[in-house]
Image (cartoon, rainbow, N blue to C red):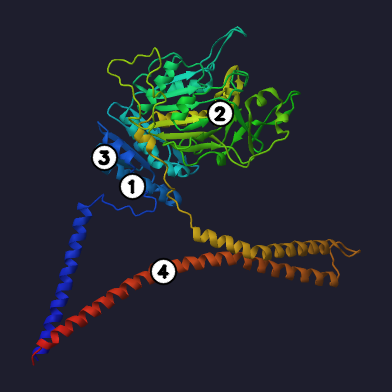
Amino acid sequence: MTTQRSKLSRSTLGWGAVAALAVVLISLIVIFDYSLEGWQIDLTENHLYTLSPGTRRILAGIREPIDLDFFYSSRAAQSLPQLRAYADHVRNFLKEIADDSDGKIRLHIIDPQPYSVAEDRAAALGVTGMPLNAAGSKFYFGLAGTNSTNGQQAIPFFDPSKQRFLEYDIAKLIYRLAHPTKPVVEWYSSLPMTGGYNAQTGQFRQPWLVYRQAAQLYDLRTLSPTAKTIPQDTRVLVLVDPRGLSEATRFAIDQYALRGGHILAFLNPASASAGPGGPSMGPGSHLPKLLTAWGVRFNPNEIVADRSLALSVSGPDGAPTENPAFIGLGRRDMSQHDVITAGLSNVNVANTGYLSPVKGSKTKFEPLMWTSTDAEPMPAERASMTQPVSLLEGFAPTGKRYTLAARVTGMVKTAFPGGPPKGVTLPAGQPDLKASVKPLNLVVFADSNMLADYMWVRQLNLFGQPLAQAWASNGDLVLNALDNLSGSNDLISIRGKAGFTRPFTRVQALRRVAQARYRAQQLQLQQQLRQTERQLTLLQSKRNNKSTLILTPAQQREIRHFETERLAIRKRLRAVQAGLVRSINRLGTELKAINIILMPGVFALAALLAAAWRRRRHSARALPGDQT
């Protein structure tokens, strides 16, 4: 009797403990839901929700609050499942940025309804809506930011194809709001980019289009070829065909690089000096000591020709002919992992050299543009003194790709280890740097012809007004490079992450296997189907001599036979095509079974076994103390 009461008491106590534990767990869930709001652990493979160190430093450097308005049409997104998933990712990432900003970023999530004040505000701030229907409804999926001085920046629409650069785009917007002044760009060019009076024609020529575009966005200042210093407020130093620079200016560039300078350089082999009419002869632009110190190898006496990527130019007789020295680069010839070149459609270069890293250099050399494997280096003079068709005579491609542009970053040493050149005196208090105090950020191109209008712009005349129509992305490339380099080192350090959408690699592999398995049978059935339909058409075209509407019994039997055979072939063809779908559905069913049944079952079984073991162990200990 005592034993039964003891067991009943233990049972009652056990159920009471379970009830108490449930109350405690529910209470903890409610408490944690409020107290741990915003906490997360990023277990994604590529850390999609983890801010880069550069982004964290940008947030830490914000001095005044910034308002971010995330315009997202959540109701309209119900019919756009792919955009809805990406929008959830963007929203969560923005929340992570706001949480990490110590209150300096104020995030507002707005669902603009048609013809509402919110929709008008989105349009005023530069967020564009994507038309959804003929009724005028729009889908908004963009970001606008404002600062305390009424400065505005916007991402008009979050393009899913640029999702790998999501963090960079948002960090750039925040950085521009935190630093609203126009970046200063020191610009040196030995080419007539800035326009001016042409003594040969007696007329004034317009500045090159790429220079005019940059002047609208940046505070452009001309660097003298005899300059002894680079101003401290310079955000980007642009060197276009940098020939004719004095030794003092080269030393100033060296010291600027050691201070962590941002340099955009367009070099030129000896054959190509892009004038208004096209390439012409001239000495090559070369900075041998500086480039070597920065870890870049460039031979000004060679160009690289590419037979597969050759552009068509006008020959001596006016007929179009392919010129392997004029190269048209497509998406596959440019890095899609760097914000400067990602998304560009095509870029044209002419009489370009090529780059390579210096062995043993400590800098990081990242190619941005490259040739195909059907390329060959050749003397620079050959491209200028021979006809384009003659460049293909004896053409012997090496089978390797040549780098035409690269990003170079890292700590470097001075190119003037012996000190300043003769006659150069440093200002009082300015040390003669021997090594980097901050990492160098260099983007270098082995061609400057690419900047000339004729390489990427078509000049039109619209009702008497000149109109420039771009047929290549050269201008966008330069503006992307300036945009990237004009930011801080923290912004430049942010690299593209892996895409948010992940391919179903198992499904893709299964599809390839199934297609290979069924392809031969599918082709055979399709051929039989076409042959049967031809026979059927031929029979139906044969009519009785007395009437075009009557068929003989034999012809009718033949037609019924071929119609039956056609139906059978189509049925077998559908069965073959359905085999792939069944295989994929089978995989989906297996994954669901594993996720919904198997894994929870494993955990439940493990919990039951653990509970049974503990109960048995407890009973074994309690038996010796039982009394009757």
Question: Residue 433's spot in the image, x, y percent?
Answer: 34, 24
Residue 95, by quadrant, is top left
Q: Which mark is residue 299?
A: 2
Q: Which residue position holds label 3?
A: 101
Query: Mark 3 or mark 1, which has the lower sequence index?
Result: 1
Q: Nearer the viewer, residue 384 or 27?
A: 384
CA gap, disc 2 and disc 4 = 60 Å
CA gap, disc 2 and disc 3 = 47 Å
Looking at the image, residue 517 lies above or below residue 275: below
Query: Mark 4 or mark 1, which has the lower sequence index?
Result: 1
Q: Residue furthest right?
A: 545
Q: Is residue 7 visible?
A: no
Q: Looking at the picture, which amino acid does disc 4 mark?
A: Ile
CA gap, disc 4 and disc 3 = 40 Å
CA gap, disc 2 and disc 1 = 42 Å
> Residue drawn at (17%, 81%), measured in percent from left and top?
618
SS at mark 3 in the image:
loop
Q: Which mark is residue 50?
A: 1
Q: Of discs 3 and 1, which sits in the foreground?
A: 1
Q: Looking at the picture, which amino acid does disc 1 mark?
A: Thr
